[in-house]
Amino acid sequence: MLSDSDMDRISGLSDEVLIKILMFVRTKVAVSTSLLSKRWEYLWMWLPKLEYGDRYSSPSECKRLECFLDKNLPLHRAPVLESFRLDLSSSYFTPESIKLWVVIALSHCVRELEVIYDSYPEKPNILPSNLYTCKSLVVLKLDGGILMDVPRMAFLPSLKTLYLLTVRYFNEESLQRLLSSCPVLEDLSVDFSENDCMGKPTVVVPSLLSLSLYIPHSFDIDGIVIETPSLTHFKLMDHNNKSHYCLVKNMPNLIEADIDVAFPNIKSLIGSITSVKRLVLCSEAMYDKSFLFNKLKHLKLCRCNEHSSDLLVRLLKDSSNLQALDLFEMADHDGNFDMVYWNQPSTVPQCILLSLQTLNWSEYAGTPEERDLAVYILKNAVHLKTTTISSVEVEVPKFEMIKELALSPRASTTCQLVFD
């Protein structure tokens, strides 16, 4: 605890220094310093970063916070808000109050705005129309059943980061209209809501560098259109159970891709990501022989699908410079299939002979198919340096797994076999 002399020394610092000190604590704590003395009474009102709310607040706490913000936020003195965050995962906050708070943040030239809000009934319109014409906004993050009603005159000239997580859209044009209003957008993440309807989600953003899309199981969709020629990082999770197309234009600058899809025709998708250096993939579908992954260095393949070994063989043949191979199961994926139908290729893929250096295998159960694949790689991978096996005992004891692989022939005399 600080002594009176310590407090006197701190209080003797300039307002600018004290405000910087307050920025290191939560807004709630910074506000409480107003009780210390007259010197501290209004300092917190100059804070350029504000964060309010707690999703675990009681109804009475929510009401007190709403009254506090209604009274004090209009009096905030900082000319520019670097960030303004509202975590209001409760139906106890009125949409009218939230809209007012956002308007006030916009009047302070807010640069980063984040609103987390879930309530009943759904589709609350808590966003003011001038949000869509804010010149200062660089980062916008919206999470929850917030309605996006984007006006035709929308224009966000500074927006570079946009996260839309389970928000609702006024109509099918809302998302496309919003994206077209962001000329310098670089980072986009969109998680669509279950039981929502979009028709044809379209992402056409020439400036975009990073894109993450999540299509849930029961989302009503006809197809996806993606045209992002500058993209370097791409994540697509499409678990939709409705038959739909995926039209993806070429991504020549792509470095990383994380693909988890359920739809059967992946030709357009695969054709767009052939420039990747790192690829994470889970798919029940195969692609034809017309694609080459000449830049691919690191492949992570999910093993949850019945014919994942066939997809693995295809990828090994098409990735002549592959250096690292991970076999794993994505989170929440059903691992009922354990590399069944392993068909040894007639010729050894070039990457196994010339470039593969690392093999990581998680959830290795030691089934005959898994053992044959592991032995095949060890037998032919001349430049293999490390093989790490994380095993799970189902029918084969761990000791037997270790013994089988330890005694198998290895093309690399320096390969280290590690069992976790």
Image (cartoon, helix red, strand yellow):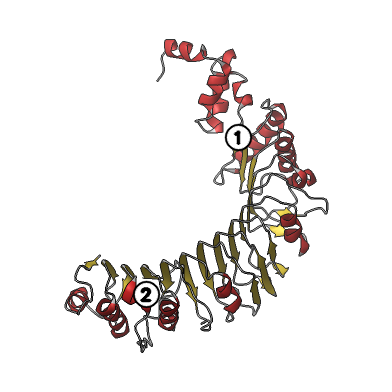
Contact? badges 2 and 1 (CB < 8 Å):
no
Q: Is residue 239 above or below residue 133?
A: below
Q: How many callouts does the rendering have?
A: 2
| Residue depicted at x 61% and y 30% | 48
Q: CA distance from mark 2 to mark 1?
A: 52 Å
Q: Amino acid at mark 1?
A: Leu
362 left or right of 242 in image? left
The residue indicated by pointer 1 is 50
Tell me the residue at 71%/51% (across/down): 183
Camera-side residue of 214 and 52: 214
The disc labelled 2 sits on which kind of residue?
Cys
Categorize mark 2 by other alpha carbons within 10 Å: few (<14), some (14-19), many (20+): many
Q: Which mark is residue 351?
A: 2
| Residue at horizontal 46 percent and vertical 11 percent from the top | 9
The residue at the far right in this view is 152
Pick the quarter of the image with the N terminus.
top left
Front residue of 368/56: it is 368
Instruction: Give the secondary structure at mark 1.
Output: strand
Query: Element at badge 2?
Result: helix
Determine which of the numbered discs, if any, sits on residue 289 in the image.
none
* Corner quadrant of residue 344: bottom left
Asked if residue 284 lies left or right of residue 404, the reply is right
Where residue 376 sits: x, y (%)? 29, 81
Front: mark 2 or 1? 2
Q: Is residue 47 above or below residue 363?
A: above
x and y, in percent, of residue 187 in the image: 60, 53
For this view, does 49 lie left or right of residue 297? Answer: right
Residue 400 position, x and y percent, is 19, 78
Q: In front: 355, or 176?
A: 355
Position in image of residue 118 (x %, y %)? 64, 52
